[in-house]
Structures are given as C-alpha cells and as structure tokens.
Amino acid sequence: MARFSTAFLGCKVSHADVQEIRERLLAEGHVEDASDADVAVISTCCVTREAVAKSRKAARQAARSGGRVYLTGCAANLSGSFDDLPPNVTVVALSSERTAAFVAGNVGAIGCVQAEARLDRVRAFVKVQDGCSFSCRFCVIPQVRGASRSRPAEAVLAEVRRRVRQGHREVVLTGINLGCYRDRGAGYDLERLVRTVGMIPGLARLRLSSVEVNHVTEGLIRAMRETETVSPHLHVPLQSGDDKVLRAMGRRYNVATYLRRLEHAEGFNLTTDVIVGFPGEDEHAFDGTLATVERAGITKVHVFPYSPRPGTATAAEDTVPARIKRERGARLRALSREACLRRWRGKIGREDVVLIDRPGRGFSNDYSPWIVEGRIGELVEVRGKAVTEEGILAA
C-alpha cells in the first residue's frame, strides 16, 4: 500500500486528469495522505514560461521527500521541461487517456480495493473532450495534447450520474476545445450534450468551462437558456481586441465576429482570457482590447503576458518589453475589477441562490462570488446587501 498525494497546475482539464489518477490509486487500495505521502502525482502546465517554472518548483519540492514523484500533464509532454530533476522523479510523457493506467501500474496494485472515491471538491469537473486540431501561432497545446478527440456521450453521462450520486451539486463540463465536442455515432454535439446532462436527476447546476467564440452559436445559447440547471455564464477567450494582432496570432475570428456572437448571450456573465504584449501589439492595438472588453460586457479578465513557447510559430518573437506587458496587464485588470464591481452592485437588494464551496464563500448561478455563511456544499437563498472587493455580501 502506498500513501499518495495529488496536485495540479493550470486549467480545469489538468484538474480532471489528476483526479482520474487519484481515483485509480484509491480504487486499487492506496491511501491518500498529503502530509506523509511516499508517492506524489503532479499534473503540470506549460502554457507560459512561468507555468513551467512553477511545475519545476513543485517537482523539486516533492522530490525532496525522497518518495516517488510522477509528473503528468502538459509540461510533461513538452520536451526539455524537466531535463535535470532527481532520479526519483518520473516524467510521464503520455496522452491523458494512458496516463492514469501507467501511474497506477507503476505504483502497483494491492489486494484490498476500496469503494469508488468521491472528488475532493463541491463541484466536479468532467472532461468531455481533449486536444486541439487548430494551430494558433502562439499555442503549444496541440503539441502536448494532440488532436481534438471526444469521449463517448454514454461515458460522459455515466460519469455525471456518478458525480451526482457522490453528492456533487455542480458539474462543469470541460475540455481543451470544448465546442469541438462530437460523438457522431450517437448523434451528440455540445448543444445536445448540454441539454441531456442538464436533465440528469439530482444535478443542481451545470456549467461550461470555456468555449471558443466560433462555437458560441444561437443553438448552444438556446440550449443553455432552456435547460433550467445550466448557469448563465460563459468563458469565451478573446486574446486580443485588435484584428491585426488576431491575424498574427492565427485566431479564426475578428473583433466584429467576437462581438456579434456574444450578442446572443445577453444577460450572461461573460468572462475571458487576454494575452498582453503579443509581438506587434502597439498602444493602439492594446486600446482596441480595452474597448472590446467593454463593448462585449465582459466582467472577469484572466490576463496572460505573452510568453514565447518552444515549437510554436512565434517561438523566436518577443518584441514587447516586460515593463510594457506589466503596465498593460495592470490596466486591463483594473478595467476588469470595475466591470466586476458594476455587475455585483446590480445584485444589491436582489435574491439569488449560492452554492457554498468553502468557508464563508460561494458562487451564484452566474458565477458571481458571494460572501455568505453556511455549510460547504449547501445551496442557500441570499439577498445582496453590499459589495466588497472580494464579492457580494449576503444580508
């Protein structure tokens, strides 16, 4: 029997991947013990240089314990990320579909098999798709994740039912390029999957992790509006609000298309990703990004300073000084902060339902943060009293 710990860096897909490994180890009789683990599993990230540095730091810290360390995920599949780590570290450069079986097989099974393992969070991330078949010029993900592929709808529905049975109130459907979801044999696309998952008995709330704007169709928005459990929240990456920069990035839309597509989602809480300091981004281009964020009605902006990635078309390009990247990032975060506060103020005096996911905190149906008392995992009715920097204060 091994005592093990799991950790993830990066996106919700990374979280889903490491949870699959966690469940496999528990099912084979091993014990989760973060304080005294002799096996550590870390799902790594490589979307930026900083993400790789954090993954390397986590690997070194885990290796100091003297136990076995398994590095999985995106950075593990990026050549050169972990060339000089101690011999007790194993870099698992495999597809996500093969990783859990490899780690479990390497750790070794024992005779005592436990019951199925509940996830360690109030919300469950269910991966329905992996990989990407597009080629944005800055993005390393197609290299490390492979081409787009989807899970069978039957497997997705079975996992969601299992998560509900385990007590999870909220499920988040996630994928590298979620809008590419297809199970052609069973006749499923993302729209049908949303409708079907949303009707599973016992599921209180369903959310989507991130959808590219080309996949934000009238049909998808209609499915989200017409399925009672689906949250009115969409995370739609923008990356830049300047057409010239978008072309240089290899994105498959322009600003007008982005804004037009999001018109279908009126009333939704819209969040996004933006890269600042992409090669060739001048002050005019950045001003376009600020204007597009405002015109689209976006609240939360996840800001990423451009970071050249090995093997990409722009790997040798990094023309915007770090100081300018930091300054533009700060301006964009300030705009995002004001947009969030504005949306939150609109909830003062209004009733809402919040899922409490940690002590004193939770999220409403549109993924707005609330400060509220109650038991973790409980859905509570609230009324907005005031707004703080951290969210809406419940009366």
Image (cartoon, rainbow, N blue to C red):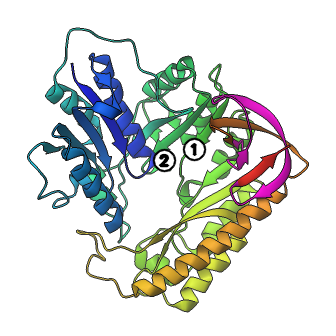
Where in the figure is residue 38, as x and y percent of width and height? 21, 32
On screen, 251 above or below 93? below
- Check residue 35 for magenta coloring: no
Task: Name the residue at the left extreme.
Answer: 87
Depth check: 313 or 134 in front?
313
Q: Amino acid at mark 2?
A: Leu
Q: Position of residue 180 (x, y in %)?
A: 46, 48
Q: Secondary structure at mark 2?
A: helix
Residue drawn 29% across the image and 74% down it: 313
The circle on residue 208 is 1
Q: Amino acid at mark 1?
A: Leu
Q: Is residue 307 left or right of residue 348?
A: left
Determine the residue positioned at 49% across, 84% down.
244
Residue 15 vs residue 392, the one in the foreground: 392
181 lies left or right of 30: right
Are discs 2 and 1 less than 8 Å apart at CB?
yes
Residue at the (44%, 37%) spot, across then down: 128
Q: Is residue 369 magenta?
A: yes
Which residue appears at 27% of the width and 56% of the height? 57
Viewer-side residue, 371 vs 95: 371
